[in-house]
Image (cartoon, helix red, strand yellow):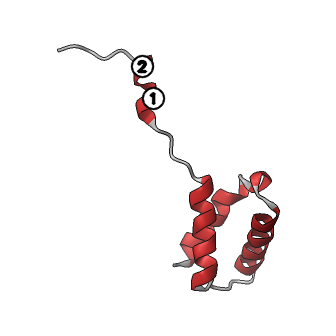
Amino acid sequence: MSYRDQKKYLDFLKSHERKFRRKELEDYKSFVKRQKDDEDFDSISMKRLKEMYDKYNVRVDRSKFDSFFKKQKP
């Protein structure tokens, strides 16, 4: 993964930092520290970062909102 991906994931997770469990918070802080030191993440670290990102980046099912909008009949 590239530096840009790392930065994107860390920026997103920053807004969810208060929701982290203890282990996730420790991992996140170590990721931020490594990012500041301009280190590239190894495959294991990148995998953990991606898992955290996927855990907190929940997509909204927009089909639930169909009942609030009228559908036009042809």
Q: Report the residue at 66% width, 61% height from top.
A: 11
Q: Is residue 20 above or below residue 67?
A: below
Q: Residues within 10 Å of mark 2 (few under 14, many from 20)?
A: few
The amino acid at mark 2 is Ser
Q: Report the residue at 44% width, 34% height from top.
A: 62
Q: Is residue 20 above or below residue 37?
A: above
Q: Which mark is residue 31?
A: none
Badge 2 marks a residue whose secondary structure is helix
Badge 1 marks a residue whose secondary structure is helix
Left or right, residue 25 beside residue 11? right
Q: Tell me residue 9's x, y (percent).
A: 61, 64
Q: Tell me residue 29's x, y (percent).
A: 79, 70
Q: Residues within 10 Å of mark 1 (few under 14, many from 20)?
A: few
Left or right, residue 14 beside residue 57? right
The residue pinned by badge 1 equals 64
Residue 27 lies in quadrant: bottom right
Left or right, residue 35 beside residue 1? right
Please count the marks in the image: 2
Q: Tell me residue 5's x, y (percent).
A: 55, 70
Q: Report the residue at 60% width, 61% height from top.
A: 53
Between 15 and 59, the one lying in front of the other is 59
Residues marked 2 and 1 touching at CB (< 8 Å): yes
Residue 73 lies in quadrant: top left
Q: Which mark is residue 67?
A: 2
Q: Tell me residue 24's x, y (percent).
A: 75, 65
